[in-house]
Amino acid sequence: MEFRLKEAAESLAATPTAVDALLRNRPEAWLECSNGEGTFTPRDVLGHLIFAEMTDWIPRARHILEGDGAVPFAPFDRVGHRPLIEGRPIGELLDRFAALRRENVAILRAFHLGEAQLEMTGTHPELGPVTLRQLLATWVVHDLGHIAQLLRILAHEYRDEIGPWRQFVTIVG
Amino acid sequence: MEFRLKEAAESLAATPTAVDALLRNRPEAWLECSNGEGTFTPRDVLGHLIFAEMTDWIPRARHILEGDGAVPFAPFDRVGHRPLIEGRPIGELLDRFAALRRENVAILRAFHLGEAQLEMTGTHPELGPVTLRQLLATWVVHDLGHIAQLLRILAHEYRDEIGPWRQFVTIVG
């Protein structure tokens, strides 16, 4: 399927509702579990999404639109979210993500991007040249990937509770 | 993590909101895509969830609770959802799933299941003996697995749109 800005913006706008449904009423133990030492907990995933709203997508889009495409993006800090989530209740983090996303989707729409702008390029510090269109498509897919990650982490916790169904249910890992 | 009925019921109750957020405003082309010939589209996944509400979880729980545990469950029909989704708008299907799930979670809570009942067994036509607890835990995990499937199908459609990020983003397949 071809990237379309309007569809991408709708997908981005819907993400906080999906994440909220999956996390808001989870017991604390489920929010603190992970699929193994050093891997993300659901709370980490949410923190990572918040941190990317603050430092990745819109800042990188602006960097491209301001004509600085030849200057590599600042590298993304994969553990930069940690101080943001430390001791914060999940409801507060969900509200924060929703507010940041709402603001960023409004900024995206207000750019009124045309084809020429979507073809403008930036420089990823590891991947090299990327277009604004690819950056925005990746924002959408990054959401979907991290919601799927949340689901895998949550499902994994019930791996011993489903008994013989484990052979049918691949998500528990 | 140990299965707890209250937590399981909350997880089940939240699923329609997550699915709704992911599908309601998707363009028709995105709802009809799949990861390959013969695999589920997002609309199929939703139909499958609806059909399982009608024929799987609560009917099987009742079958166990009514003392028919030695009689195998009716096999689940993996394509039984097809007539249900044929030509139906996505909003209608989402509303239907939400209504069925609301009703089934209310039934589940009204069972007021205790430990002894959770240990009652049924007979799965392929897997053999299963407990009511395992059936209910599988209901929860089945939701999470199918939401993750939705995400994979949706993300896969943007696989060519994310350019070089494809090497970082594993969900696009």
Image (cartoon, coloured by chain):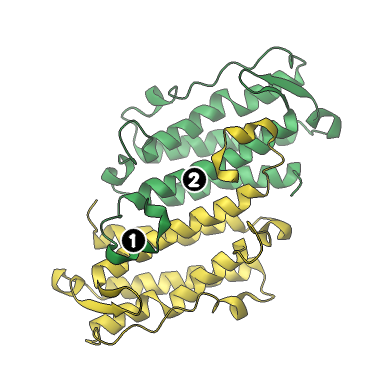
Chain colours: A green, B yellow
Badge 1 or badge 2: first in the primary sequence: 2
B135 or A55: nearer the viewer: B135
The spot of residue A12 in percent (x, y) is 62, 42
Q: Residue at x 63, y 49 (%)?
A: B156
Locate residue B143: give its quadrant: bottom left
Q: Residue furthest right?
A: A116
Chain of the residue on which disc 2 is drawn = A
Front in this rendered view, residue A34 or B101: A34
> Which mark identifies residue A130?
none
Which three-letter amino acid code belongs to the residue tagged 1?
A: Arg
Q: Which mark is residue A166?
A: 1
Mark 2 nearby-residue class (10 Å; few <14, some 14–19, many ≥20): many
Q: Residues within 10 Å of mark 1 (few under 14, many from 20)?
A: some
**Seen in the image, is A168 located left or right of residue A117?**
left
Q: Is residue A1 above or below residue B36?
A: above
User: What residue is shown with label 2?
Assistant: A147
Badge 1 and badge 2 both on one subunit: yes
Work out whether residue A161 or residue B21 is closer to the camera in this orientation and state it: A161
Q: Look at label 2 and name its amino acid.
A: Ile
Position of residue A60 measured from the top left corner of the image (x, y, whole percent): 65, 23
The answer to which quarter of the image holds residue A64 is top right
Q: Secondary structure at mark 1?
A: helix
Q: Residue at x 25, y 72 (%)?
A: B132
Residue A137 point in image, percent of width and height: 68, 38
